[in-house]
Amino acid sequence: MPRTPRPGPSPRVSVIVPARDAMPGITRAVTSAIRQTIGLSRLEIIAVDGGSADGTAAELDRLAADCPSLRIVRHARSRGGTGALRNTGLDLARGDFVFFLDADAHLAPDALRRMVATADAGGTDVVLGKMVSPDGRGVPTAIFRHNQLRTDVHASHAYATLEPCKLFRRALVERLQLRFPAHLRHDEGKPFTAAAYLNASGISVVADYDCYHLGPPPGRGRTAPGLADRVEAMRPLLETAARHTRPGPRRDAVMRHHFRRELCPALRTLPHEDETEARERLLPTLRRWARAHCSDALFATLTAPERLMVHLLRTGRYDDLLSVVCGAERDARRGHLVEKGRVYWLHPFFRDPDADVPDACFDVTDRLPVRHHLAGAGWHGRSTLRVRGRAAVEGLASDPEEDRAELVLRRRGAREELRIPVVATAEDDPAEFAADLDIATADGGAPLRPGVWDVFLDVRAQGISRTVRFGSRHDDGLDIGTARRVVTVGPGLRARVTPYFTSPYRNLSLDIGPAPGGAPCEVTETVWHPSDKGTLVVAGRLLPPGTPARGRVLRLRAEHTDGRVHDHPVRYAAGHPAGAFTARLPVRDLGRGRWTVTLAVVAPDGPGPGRPAPAAPVPPPARLPGARWMRRGRPYYAKPLVGRGEVTLELRVAPVRLLAAVRNRLRR
């Protein structure tokens, strides 16, 4: 029976270790918790022994003899998985957070300290620490490409990892009364984690430290779950997803994960199952779920083989479903039909009158993969960047005379797109191309505007167009940084061009900014007005120094991501050196959202009559605090945004979230 919780201050973390016949890994698992740098005074470790018969109980007693923070709980052996053991640990936990540590895994020494600090900094309810496996077990990678202080399941890849080896805020667990399904033998942790994700105030990711080390993969003697076990494990998952989401795109995104990861793989096991049980009990249950939870919008996002299986399941055609599953490997290699701008998979059921399956089940137009490769980028002439590579739509032949590909540039944080024609460079290989980007004239004869431009490819074949991000696949050792250059973009104007690979996906982007000494003006100071709340003051001078203000109309410009622009006049300072100016931007009058701050100079010798020259950036100051003001009785704030690739000041304007402000004040 569990012992009564010990008196004293609540620990920060309760580490719960379920153990059943867990030798020899249990020693390393518990020891890794004991040696956490967060300190034993801030930890409680609850090891729940589920009736082990291999010496696990004696080993836990030995470890507890030297560690007062380690509590051993005896639990009767059951036929289920480790869910009941985790539940016992949860009933006893007193920490601000709980962490579930499997008996065959271990924690890195600084894992819990980093995860707790991240949760405190972000005010989040769930923290994912980077998972690693030196022994070949599959681990998620997309979610751990970079640290994330605050995100959610809809803005990240967090939902792709539902194992419960996470840090959970215990207040969330108790508010939702979350517990593990005690009867399940497989995947018992997934409904718990899914419910926590879908109700968390925020999710954090620690990706720069290997927090959680998985144990070796299961031995050969362990059999994969059968269809009956899969269906039983799927039930609480789908119920959880339906209970904690509303009908619409967000529910579809969650359900799509379960259809692709659980339901469709379960259907692929049909050839190995007892046919009578599958037809009478299991397939009707799966059919009911497919009809209840697979909306038309979700159905359209599945792959063609998945759509075909789900359609046959929803219509109760079990014989045809078994036929499709048995021939899946052979039929996957069949070709395609291009018709009226759409591409169809030539499965035997396609337009077979006896099969009577809608064409939508075979439509692969939006899923055709694009093979692309960046060969290099170098300068061709004074201001032209030549990008070379290969690109083709897989499975479709391209006609060089009709299928014209394009390089597509999209300005980050703005609704701007430029298209550059691509020219084939090899007669025997239409996939090879080159595109010339003239920085001085790319924007309809005007220079490319300052900012970060992300590079895409629009690849076409047989009337089908596919647009993909470009650059992640490139020659080994390609150093795109060697293509940095300062180029002339107009009379007296120069631009700094920096091609680089983004982090973490390694796609190609261009950072365009004024070159030192070549900008039309420079900013010397950016501060908030001391008495006029919500007003930004920008001071600077025309370049080169001493340039007279005559004929130079200067405007301080705020541009919203949706294209809205606010221009404000600039005053030249009398009695100061020629060309010195100040400008005031009433940020308090801007609408909510993200605003880019630049200086626009209108000069007679510019790109055209009355046309603004390329905007000069207002560089983000090293230290610019946020500002607050009242608007119609409600507090608003403006906050400078800082991130890689930014060359000009960006502000986020939004109303203050009162509850969040109160929570932050209480934490202090």
Image (cartoon, rainbow, N blue to C red):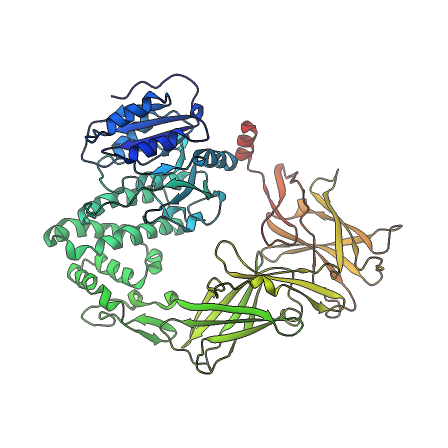
Give x and y (percent) for residue 609.
75, 70
Give x and y (percent) for residue 25.
29, 36
Give x and y (percent) for residue 73.
28, 24
In this view, the residue in front, 341 or 304, is: 304
In which quadrant of the rendered view does residue 341 lie? bottom left
Question: Residue reaching furthest top?
Answer: 7
Indicate whether 49 appears above or below 258. Answer: above
In which quadrant of the rendered view does residue 95 lie? top left
Tell whether 311 sits left or right of 255. Answer: left
Question: Residue reaching furthest left?
Answer: 276
In which quadrant of the rendered view does residue 485 lie? bottom right
Q: What residue is at 37 percent from the left and 65 percent from the top?
A: 367
Tell whether 101 sits left or right of 513. Answer: left
Indicate whether 157 appears above or below 410. Answer: above
Looking at the image, can residue 368 be seen? yes
Q: Tell me the quarter of the image containing the N terminus.
A: top left
Indicate whether 115 appears above or below 396. Answer: above
Q: What residue is at 55 percent from the left and 30 percent from the top?
A: 662
